[in-house]
Image (cartoon, rainbow, N blue to C red):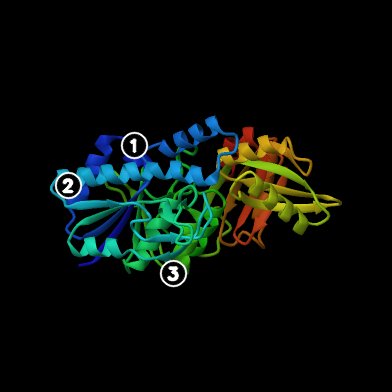
Amino acid sequence: MSLIVRKYGGSSLSTPEHIKTIAREIASIKSKMIVVVSAMGTTTDQLSLLAYAVSQAPIRRELDMLLSTGERVASSLMAMALNDVGCSAISFTGSQAGVFTDNSHTNAQIIDLRPIRVEDELNRARVVVLAGFQGVSPQTKEITTLGRGGTDLTAVAMAHYFKSESCEILKEVDGVFSADPRLVSHARRIPELSFEILQELTFWGAKMIHHRAAELAARVQLPIYVGLAHGKGEGTKIFKGAKMFEEKKVLSVNSHSQVMQIQIQAHSQGEGYKAFGLFLSKYNLPWPQILDSTQKEKTCTMLITGPLETLDAIANLSASSSEIKVGKKDYASVTATCAGAIGSDLIGTLTLKLDEKGIHAHHILLSPMSVTYIIDKQNRETVIQTLHG
């Protein structure tokens, strides 16, 4: 009997009724199944706000202890709902499921999987419900978390380990779209994507799947299906053989809603990264995502993004630092991805469209398949709609 690995996003689990609806659907499927769940609704955001309400820079070990509870609640409730409809199920935390990570907190990396208990329960014909986003360090025995969106990573890793034919990522949106449907009403669903394009989209802010999960799926060539958690839809299939031809046409527009510029006093970029690393370590902060860095005279300038609480903590704590200063807080990035963007007139065409709107980018960043504009945050929605149009 083939194994199904499904991941359910937090918004699809936001109420008890949502959980019971999913439980009834899972019970109707006669197959071995691993269900990986995120925390319900906005639970992770609420827990993070609590942490930063009591501490300006929460100890990352304690932050993991706190944030990991969200997925534990969701997994136990899902197992209860499944058993209530006659489907034998058991929930596991990341550590119980044998998800071993490095020693990092709040952004740990999976180094090994030993899901012995998961395999035993599958062989007993039980649905296994896993708390995503978390693991345990075999060295320190500490609970760790994989970073925001890390439940996707748990699901992809488990699907690969158990040789599932694919991994299903189920959400409130029917697949991958050409832009966020909440911001662009005529955004279109993309039926299929290559692994390479998926990695590009997720790096530049697409939220359909965590970037590290996209990287892992590409590395192990694991097909992914992104679709609706509630109701029937067509979804998006991501696989090696997806047909992606060079076209001078925008495939998808994505964005990081919060980008911050920091300036580090250093004689070189190497020294700048070292000083920034020491600063983060001193205040128990995870590394943000670095979009760009430049060096001019004795100043290393970086453009960074990440969870809002991380950026806010960096901004607040840099006020007492002599080496690290915040240059600009209210930037956003908007990226147009197109197979064949480089070596074409697309960059000029898009930039002229922004000029017509009276919007001028502070920086333009280029990658093999994308053009990224760093703009004032207040212009973000206008730029997304303009580039998509």
Mark 2 Cα shell of 10 Å, populated few (<14), some (14-19), many (≥20): some
In contact (CB < 8 Å): disc 1 and disc 3: no
Residue under pointer 3: 220
Residue sticking out furthest to the right: 297
In contact (CB < 8 Å): disc 3 and disc 2: no
Q: Earlier in the sequence, mark 1 or mark 2?
A: 1
Residue under pointer 2: 83
Whether residue 209 is visible to the viewer of this picture, yes or no, is no
Whether residue 225 is visible to the viewer of this picture, yes or no, is yes
Spatial CA span between label 1 and label 3? 32 Å
Residue 121 falls left or right of residue 242: left
Q: Could you tell me which residue is drawn at 26 percent across and 45 percent down?
A: 78
Query: In this rendering, is residue 369 above or below 360?
Result: below
Looking at the rendered image, the quarter that the N terminus falls into is bottom left
Residue 96 position in % (x across, y down) = 33, 56
Q: Earlier in the sequence, mark 3 or mark 2?
A: 2
Residue 200 position in % (x across, y down) = 55, 57
Residue 331 position in % (x across, y down) = 66, 39
Q: Earlier in the sequence, mark 1 or mark 3?
A: 1
Q: Could you tell me which residue is drawn at 59 percent across and 38 percent down?
A: 57
Query: In this rendering, is residue 225 above or below 9?
Result: below
- For the residue marked with disc 2, what is the amino acid? Asn
